[in-house]
Image (spheres, helix red, strand yellow):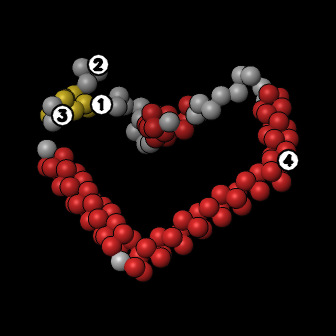
């Protein structure tokens, strides 16, 4: 419960700071002459960037489409049964099983314990 309260508290301060930053920025950009000049320059720069990005895609768009088509063809050539599932030894259970097998004294039955409602319970299968 304490962790949840800490999260709410940090969210509150984050929101408070974000609101303060937005309000301060708005006051600067709309309330001062220098801020209005800066805002006007930023808007002009964004319009220039829009033109630059359009020029880039007009120039290199066809090349990008061709490379994308080549990539798609290569992906289609990959084997269908190829999956991204981890090998059994790379999961945490596989690693724990390897540790149990390789640890000394594994001829004895390894006891397993579980936690239920904060209390340790022995495994019933012995």
Q: In x, y percent, where is residue 81?
A: 71, 22
Image check: 15 left or right of 36? left
Q: In x, y percent, where is residue 92?
A: 45, 38
Q: Residues within 10 Å of mark 1 (few under 14, many from 20)?
A: few
Pair 2/3: label in front? 3
Q: In x, y percent, where is residue 117?
A: 15, 31
- Judged from the image, the secondary structure of the residue bearing numbered disc 3 is strand
Answer above or below: position of 100 versus 50. above
Residue bearing mark 3: 120
Contact? badges 2 and 1 (CB < 8 Å)? yes
Earlier residue among tags 4 and 2: 4
The residue positioned 50% from the left and 36% from the top of the image is: 91
> Depth check: 25 or 110 in front?
25
Rendering quarter of residue 19:
bottom left
Earlier residue among tags 4 and 1: 4
Residue bearing mark 1: 112
Q: Residues within 10 Å of mark 2 (few under 14, many from 20)?
A: few
Residue bearing mark 2: 125
Image check: 55 left or right of 100? right
Residue bearing mark 4: 63
Earlier residue among tags 2 and 3: 3
- Judged from the image, the secondary structure of the residue bearing numbered disc 2 is loop
The residue positioned 54% from the left and 65% from the top of the image is: 43
């Amino acid at each position: 419960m304490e962790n949840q309260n800490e999260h709410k508290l940090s969210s509150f301060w984050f929101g408070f700071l974000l609101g303060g930053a937005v309000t301060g920025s708005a006051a600067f950009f709309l309330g001062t002459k220098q801020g209005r000049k800066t805002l006007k320059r930023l808007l002009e720069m964004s319009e220039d960037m829009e033109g630059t990005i359009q020029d880039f895609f007009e120039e290199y768009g066809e090349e990008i489409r061709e490379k994308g088509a080549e990539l798609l063809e290569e992906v289609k050539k990959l084997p269908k049964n190829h999956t991204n599932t981890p090998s059994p030894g790379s999961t945490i259970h596989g690693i724990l099983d390897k540790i149990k097998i390789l640890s000394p004294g594994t001829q004895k039955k390894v006891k397993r314990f579980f936690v239920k409602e904060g209390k340790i319970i022995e495994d019933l299968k012995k």
